[in-house]
Image: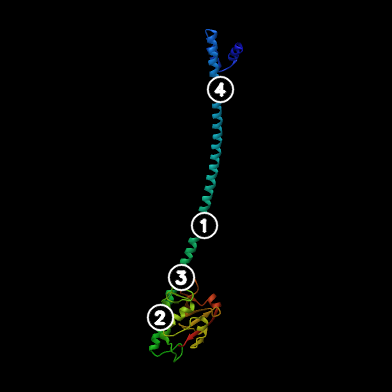
Amino acid sequence: MLARRLVEIYTSQGEQQSSLAVILGAQSIDDLVSRLETVNSVTTQDSTLIRQVISYQHAIVRHRQVLRHARVAERRLVSVRAAAKRSIGARLATEQRLYNSVRGEINQIEAAQRAAQLAAARRAEAAAQAQQTTSRLGGFDPIGAGSSVGPERYSQVVSIAMQYLGVQYVWGGASPAGFDCSGLVMYVYAQVGVSLPHYTVAQWDYPNAVSVARSQLEPGDLVFFDGLGHVGIYIGNGEFIHAPHTGTVVSIDRLSGWYSSEYVGAKRILG
């Protein structure tokens, strides 16, 4: 048995060569047995250590694989997020351009409307001054002799209505806090002493009113549209002032386009 173990140690490679040197250095049988026990003990410890080292190596390999997969997943996620960010940025840029375009068009429309309203106000003021001059000179009465609403009061109707340009439309409203179409007409005429009902059909049927041909319209005449569903005050030069609909303000429009196609007729208030 001892001889076989010595042969195994001799024929083994690596670190067991040093073990053989230890054994061959024995001075007696007892010394040899002691040295063999020591070699066996060291060999057992080496085997345990080697198994631990191998286990650690396997663990390191597994951790490296996990880290490698994690890095790949991280790069993929970063790529996806970057693509999403670029897409969102592109959409935002497109929406911003659209907003800027719409905002620019709105600004142009508002500027044109303000210019038109200013021009209409100037025309109305000039017309009022001309009517006042005509009245002082005993000239022509545009609504007929003997009527209770004369030229000066008609010019006042237009001037009063102009004061409320920009007031918000309010359904059922009949005050400077908010007007609907018939409420504006009723309120403005009340300022010159004429009590009109707050309803377009009733204003059309007002007893002290006469129909006026479109070609004979004068400032202050009431113009009706949409099957008597809407009314405004004519201010001259093919324009009228009104409270259009929810979401709008008191403004000036021309008797063209939709208003021309939906035009019903006009009434002149006699008193």
Cα separation between marks 2 and 4:
116 Å
Answer whether labels 3 and 2 touch (C-beta < 8 Å): no
Residue 174 drawn at (x, y percent):
45, 78
Give the color scheme: rainbow, by chain, secondary structure or one colour.
rainbow
Q: Which residue is mark 2?
A: 126
Q: Which residue is mark 1?
A: 94
Residue 53 drawn at (x, y percent):
54, 26
Which marked residue is nearer to the observer: mark 3 or mark 1? 1
Q: Which residue is mark 3?
A: 112
Answer whether labels 3 and 4 touch (C-beta < 8 Å): no
Q: Earlier in the sequence, mark 3 or mark 1?
A: 1
Q: Earlier in the sequence, mark 3 or mark 2?
A: 3
| Total number of numbered discs in the rendering | 4
Residue 175 drawn at (x, y percent):
43, 77
In the image, taking residue 10 as reference, residue 178 lies left or right, namely left
Which residue does the image show at 55% across and 24% down from the upper left?
48
Residue 18, which numbered label? none
Residue 47, which numbered label? 4
Q: Amino acid at mark 2?
A: Ala
Dot 3 falls on a residue whose secondary structure is helix
Dot 4 falls on a residue whose secondary structure is helix
The N terminus is located in which quarter? Answer: top right
Q: Amino acid at mark 1?
A: Thr
Q: Amino acid at mark 3?
A: Ala
Cα separation between marks 4 and 1:
70 Å
